[in-house]
Amino acid sequence: MPAAWNDTQAASFAGPLGERIYSSRLLGSDPSLVLHGGGNTSVKLRERDLLGQELEVLYVKCSGHDLAQIDAGGFTGLRLEHLRTLAGLDSLSDTVVNREVQVSALDPDAGSPSVEVLLHAIIAKPYVDHTHSERVLALTNTPSGERHVRKAYGDTVIVVPYVRPGHGLARLCAQLIAEQMTAQTIGLVLMNHGPVSFGDSARESYEAMLELVARAEAYGASQGKRRRAPARVPVAADPPATIESAGLKAARLRAQISMAAGFPVVLSRDEDPLGFAFANRGDVELLSQSGPATPDHVIYTKPVPMIGRDVDAYVGAYRRYFDEQTKARGSSIEMLDPAPRVILDHELGLCTVGRTIKQAKVAADLYRHTIELILNATALESYQALPASEIFDVEYWGAEQAKLKHGQRDEFEGQVVLITGAASGIGAACVHSYLARGACVVGVDISGKVAEVADVPGYLGVVCDVTEPEQIEAAVERCALAFGGLDMLVLSAGIFPPSRRIEDLELGDWRRTFDVNTDSELLLMRLAFPYLAMAPSGGRVVVIASKNVPAPGPGAAAYSASKAALTQLARVAALEWGEAGVRVNILHPNAVFDTGIWTDEVVSARAASYGLTPTEYRTNNVLRVEVTSHDVAELACAMCGPLFAKTTGAQLPVDGGNERVI
């Protein structure tokens, strides 16, 4: 691994803490060392407090911060003397350690320090780095891990048997350092947890970490068998030729997992060929059942991934695992939700689960690196993670459970919505309103701008002509594979042809209007129904129709008739789909002028047909207000929320009050 240190770049980071920030970012930029807030770094400085007294301060990375993007706000300053005193005590509970660490903070409002804070405190060197290097873990996570480490490093490292992070680990490291530290020592290797390096400068500690990783890689290459694995098979673009599509299979899995978890979850299929190839190994069931790469991965990947069994079988096995561990401890602990977080499937490849798409993506990133680790450890000897009892202790350890504390859930968290006509107007406004409530959103539109409506992990923009059956079918499949199904459907796509009286209306314009405004919606509803029927919280459909349904206007025969047909279709769907728990409701907006169909020319023509100016036409309603796309989007969200939980087949105007409708 080449060193990326650059003196010119480092000089732009002022002072010792600045150098700490720079080297931390270098480490964080390599996912084989650090992933998603994992790993931690620190620096020890001498400063004066408010009273002018000089004291030693440990600046250590705050828990949850990403080393790749860390700044000064990502470090917490702590009184070092107090921490060293704590580490020297015989025994301390996690609760007491957490309280005393907070007492030592220079700023009580700063973020919570890394759980390894006491380990950083007892190492005398100013700069300390800890990572979860895959190459080092490939040595430690084997049956003969300690032997491999000693052969790889000789007396340049201190080998630390696995102890759960906290006071006990810090005390053990302090003892081993006192007994074994020499001038040749460049770091520690924490078994099943990763390497620790240190130095008198940020650069020295950083380069010591790279040396630890390089030696592990060289040893693995010299000692291990050639890594043999199946060729990385690309994930098929088309669903496999089975009874149900890959999308429906993913949706069924997600529905079962949501039931086991007790709340809606997102399921995402990872598109990296590595996961697909691993899931199709002949020995995948053996390799995948040994546990997580490090204790830090337990919560996101669960003790083992699900492979070769259905969800009920996995949940049953997890419950037995929980019962065995609690019985052995004679303790009463509330079980976390037993749903799996990682699925390895021969057809789907690697799929991951989370309350949010971010959690699912984190699990995917972590497990891809676990696969690499498993394969490297297997080439060396065989993969062996921590014993089940240790995994349980970490999984049900307060510090890890705190990662799952979620506070108030967003209204649509763990749910998925597909929105047509999403590139502009009401559709684009719906995208933002549903994202704001925590939903994963798939926006569909014929315009390429649909991909630019939002730039967040929970949004997928799909360019699609909704009048083309193959394209809309592919869009639904992409939705299911990206997020695990479909809970809500917002039918917002529509066109408003040029204003013409019936005697001047071309049949082609009539048919084109019905193609987009009615026929395409029928196709999408038909495709979406199997997914909506499996939605963990019940399927919901919101149809964006028009005021022209109850009160048509002259010159809009094709538009009015197509929206009326769509309304009737939605009413029948409400009747037919109620037994499946799917509710269908209708909105009738009027004169929403910030949409794509309302060009200046259309506004002028429609205004003229009523004998109004364009300005008068825009607020031509009882309340004399202008209705916006956002107004419609917010009501669409409400129709999918709890306020409308017992309502289906409803038709609501969003028009500022129209005399003809009232």
Image: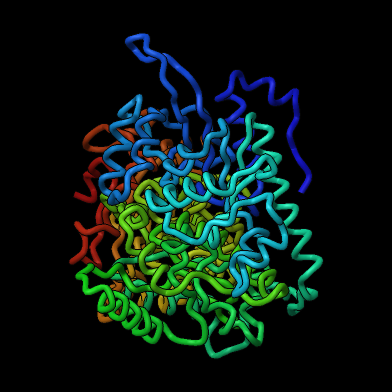
Q: Is residue 277 visible?
A: no
Report x, y in % for residue 588. 31, 53
Q: Residue furthest front?
A: 179
Residue 216 shown left or right of residue 249 in the figure: right
Q: Position of residue 155 (x, y in %)?
A: 68, 52
Residue at the image point whose x is 30% and y is 73% from the top: 582
Left or right, 154 with reference to 187: right
Please give left or right for residue 384 compared with residue 117 in the image.
Answer: right
Which residue is rendered at x = 51% and y = 57% of the image? 362
Q: Nearer the viewer, residue 411 or 309?
A: 309
Question: Total marks drawn?
Answer: 0
Q: Find residue 242 and report its horizontal and vertical position in percent.
A: 58, 89
Q: Is residue 102 left or right of residue 524?
A: left
Q: Is residue 273 above or below residue 513?
A: below
Q: Quadrant of residue 68?
A: top right
Name which residue lies at 39% across and 53% down. 168
The answer to whether residue 377 is above or below residue 50 is: below
Residue 537: image x %, image y %?
29, 68
Query: Furthest-top residue in view?
Result: 52
288 vs 618, nearest the viewer: 288
Front residue of 592 and 349: 349
In this view, the residue farthest toward the bottom is 243
User: What is the quadrant of residue 627 in the picture?
Assistant: top left
Q: Nearer the viewer, residue 428 or 240?
A: 240
Q: Is residue 186 visible?
A: yes
- Which colour scheme appears in the figure? rainbow
